[in-house]
Image (cartoon, helix red, strand yellow):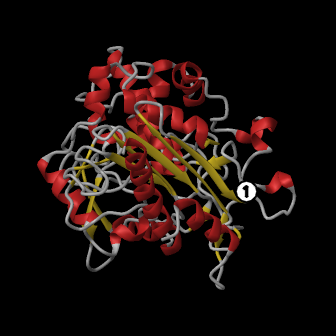
Amino acid sequence: MASLDEVFKNATENGSILGAVLLGRDTSGKFNYSKAFGRRTFGDGEESLMRTDTVLSFASATKIITCIAVMQLVEAGKLNLEDDMSPIIPELAEQEVLVGFDEGTGEPQLRKRKNPLKLRYLLTHSAGLAYDFLNPLLQRWAAFNNRTPQTSSTVVKRFAYPLTYEPGTGWDYSPGIDWAGKVVERVTGETLESYFQKHIFAPLDITSLTFWPHKHPSIQRKLAAMTTRASSGGVEAYKGPYITDGAEDCFGGHGAYGNLEDYMKILTSLLVSDGTLLRKETADLFFTPQLTVESKAAQNALIHDAEKIKIFVGDFPSDVKYDWGLGGILVQSDGSRRRSKGTMIWSGMPNLFWFIDRARGLCGVIGMQLLPPADPTTQELVKLFEEGMYELLGNQVA
């Protein structure tokens, strides 16, 4: 059987992917896997090689960083998970709930929201929100209103559209954490960039992470090319619109860039609960199930839907139950080869994936820059990476 290194070396050499970065750490500090394969650009020179300090678009892998910022403010007593965020983000609070469409005219039917917009709901994708480019109800609403989904601009302009269910009663992958990022900005009086740099990046000696790579030549020159799956089965340069195009705000749900060596510092801090980012009791809460009974049922129904799950990067076995913590999805049953109960996982659109397994003392992240998300070839590579980290850690312990 091919080793993990051989699998990724072959995948880059045969053109299945342009490049990838793979990192794994354990709580002891003895296990330290750090490899890069292939190229970051389509050039042939030394500069085009993928390295562990290559800068990637994190997309939704940004979300956990924003969640940490929110929980720091909860620790400081400036926010409460149970509080209604309506006074802080009135632009979202004024949105009504889309309940259907008139059978004759096709006009959207809306009603006033009844439940509070709790901060906890924003962090766990259970606030009634959904992504308009993924949700059929919102797609129909947008068509009726001649609204074309934008790429970015500002959080308020991009995501001020109706809810699709009452907060706390359902679940849908959503821009709730973008709104939570806006809460951080309004409570602190700082941009998310400024807050991250002071309270998350500086304490961990992180220098490559930013919402604005183009403002930092030393970061910009290490940026990897975005690729897409070609009809031939290989990869080619991606030339379409991207989620950060035209951004005027720091989008806490998808806007960060950086290298995975720096990103791993965040995951490792949470893994070992070293107190640098969050106090131990807050870190424990971070990994505690947060969903209501109704939201958990809705989440599991979506994740176990063979069609709907196709957009999510990572492996989601159908016999496993899930919940949501305060930074990612929580696995609710032990796996025989990987993922202890309580493992937190999530991903980013260009086929990034991370996990934190505190029970087994292991965390890892893999990064590629290839669209679409959950491409079948990259899904298999992500699964092999995750399994490989557990296997390599086990071999070291043995």
Residue 257 makes an appearance in the image: no
Q: Is residue 10 visible?
A: yes
Q: Give the farthest residue toward the front.
A: 398
Displayed quadrant of residue 19: bottom right
Question: Which residue was labeled with disc 1?
Answer: 40
Residue toward you, 167 or 27:
27
Which image quadrant is residue 11 in? bottom right
Residue 133, placed above or below residue 70:
below
Query: Which residue appears at 63% of the width and 70% of the height?
Result: 10
Looking at the picture, how far across and down is residue 162, in whole percent?
Answer: 35, 54
Quadrant position of the C terminus in the picture: top left
Percent position of residue 306, x then y:
30, 74
Horizontal and vertical percent position of residue 77: 32, 14
Q: In this view, does 187 lie to the left or right of 308?
A: right
In-front residue for pair 180/342: 342
- Front residue of 127 and 353: 353
Which residue occupies the foreground of this view, 158 or 206? 206
